[in-house]
Image: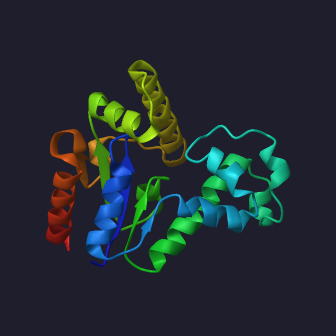
Amino acid sequence: MNQVITISREYGSGGRELGVRLAKALGIPFYDKEVISMAADDMEIAEEAFRRYDEQIEIPDYLNRERSRVLSSLYEMPISDQLFVAQSNVIRRLASRGPCVVVGRCADRILENSVNLFVHAGMEQRAERIMAAEGRSDRKETERHIREIDEKRRDYYQYYTGSSWGRAQNYHLCLDTGLAGVDGCLKAALAYLEAVQ
């Protein structure tokens, strides 16, 4: 496998789990929240502050006080744009090292020549997954939370890429974990990757 694979995903669809398992099956590195740590280090911003605003557009002004020596060309940019640029640089650096799986953070638009997957599922399956993973009991509140996270991801993606998040034409392969489960989607992704090599 000599490709970088990106995974965009609906919240609660199992996209991260699929990414972990895909990377393991291919014997390549997996990156998700590690991108945040590396970008925070590059910008010399506290990781907790960076993580709080991952894949969101709204960045409060107090984060401006947390930054220090940033390249002068970046220094005049709004902090949200600086965070995006820092993550983009990390993603490009990781991809330049060789094959890997990168989840989220507009990696499908940041990288050229990557194989881009989109993972989705019906609301019922996503709510069940989130309720189990986060110990939630209120289904309506869980569904509201899912819609809120998806909306933030959609807005972030559109703001920074100008493309429509989740639109099939923007990806090489769309996978429905609600229909095929993570196991079935893993098999489909591996078959697809073998076919496009």
Q: Quadrant of the C terminus?
A: bottom left
Direction top: furthest residue: 140
At 53% from the left and 74% from the top, the residue drawn is 93
Q: Position of residue 76 (x, y in %)?
A: 80, 53
In the figure, is residue 24 to the left or right of 105?
left
Q: Is residue 58 above or below residue 68?
A: above
Q: Position of residue 63 (x, y in %)?
A: 78, 47
At 30% from the left and 47% from the top, the residue drawn is 119
- Count how many numbered circles sit on residues in the image: 0
At 50% from the left and 53% from the top, the residue drawn is 105
- Image quadrant assignment for residue 30: bottom left
Q: Position of residue 132 (x, y in %)?
A: 37, 37
Q: Is residue 132 above or below residue 73?
A: above
Q: Quadrant of the N terminus?
A: bottom left
What is the basis of the colouring in this image? rainbow
- Choose between 139 and 84: the one closer to the eye: 139
Q: Is residue 167 above or below residue 4?
A: above
- Image quadrant assignment for residue 25: bottom left
- Choose between 100 and 96: the one closer to the eye: 100
Q: Position of residue 170 (x, y in %)?
A: 32, 49
- Image quadrant assignment for residue 126: top left
